[in-house]
Image: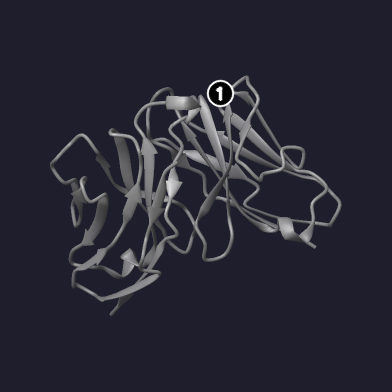
Amino acid sequence: GAVVSQHPSRVICKSGTSVKIECRSLDFQATTMFWYRQFPKQSLMLMATSNEGSKATYEQGVEKDKFLINHASLTLSTLTVTSAHPEDSSFYICSAKRGASYEQYFGPGTRLTVT
Amino acid sequence: AQTVTQSQPEMSVQEAETVTLSCTYDTSESDYYLFWYKQPPSRQMILVIRQEAYKQQNATENRFSVNFQKAAKSFSLKISDSQLGDAAMYFCAHAPIFNSGGSNYKLTFGKGTLLTVNP
């Protein structure tokens, strides 16, 4: 199977600091990775799509200067929440797909709490 | 733009019984994929079943089956012989079959249905 990991699984940071979340495809090369945000008891909201070696494409309403996404290799994408505020507290999920395959493989998610 | 609607915020079923979760969608594309994902309390998203829109035959995976009505844009999930481990949030999702307009095959999710299984 295709395995996607996320690190850390939980993180607590102070308001005004930045935090980085890693998403790794462990046993396949991910040409495209997706970052989602999920509020409690709500659906997944796509934040951005990143293709290896190119700039991420952000969904409407998502601040690209606040949520920095880097997809530097075929197995790693990072999401950096800059100058975090309490309202950024949420569950962040990444997924990865390979080539032209339709299927997305999801990571286990990262719970971010900003105090 | 695609939209996916799940009209049942919550459903419950008795263990060993059958339950059907509803999903409707709207799309201008003729070819696409439809999915049901399960999200248990661990929050890990698990693919339950998928359907290619160009296939008339309904997909089945063990106790899970779908009723795909393309003209009605309906895609319901039937869970037979419900088990306690089936308790989870279920999301219906749509993805284009082609990378048209730079869509990158991105998923559009419904709001989810929380399924409770009673012993």
- Identity of the residue furthest to the left in this view: B57
Q: Name the one closer to the observer, A11 or A53.
A: A53
Q: Amino acid at mark 1?
A: Leu
* Coordinates of residue B89 in the picture (x, y in percent): 41, 63
Q: Which residue is mark 1?
A: A74
Q: Is residue A97 above or below residue A21?
A: above
Residue depicted at x 70% and y 58% = A89
- Residue A15 is left or right of residue A96, and the answer is right
Instruction: Give the residue at x 13% y 42%.
Output: B57
* Residue A81 locus on image (x, y percent): 74, 45
Q: Residue at x 47, y 53 (%)?
A: B44
Q: Left or right? Give the position of B76 relative to A54.
A: left
**Frontmost residue, B50 versus A77:** B50
Which image quarter holds the C terminus of chain B? bottom left
- Percent of width and height locating residue B49: 28, 47
Q: Residues within 10 Å of mark 1 (few under 14, many from 20)?
A: some
Q: Give the image quarter of residue B97.
A: top left
Secondary structure at numbered mark 1: loop
Image quarter of residue A91: bottom right
Q: Is residue A46 above or below residue A13?
A: above
As rendered, which of A105 and A40 lies closer to the eye? A40
Q: Quadrant of the N terminus of chain B?
A: top left
Furthest residue in direction top, as rendered? A53
Q: Is residue A64 above or below residue B66?
A: above
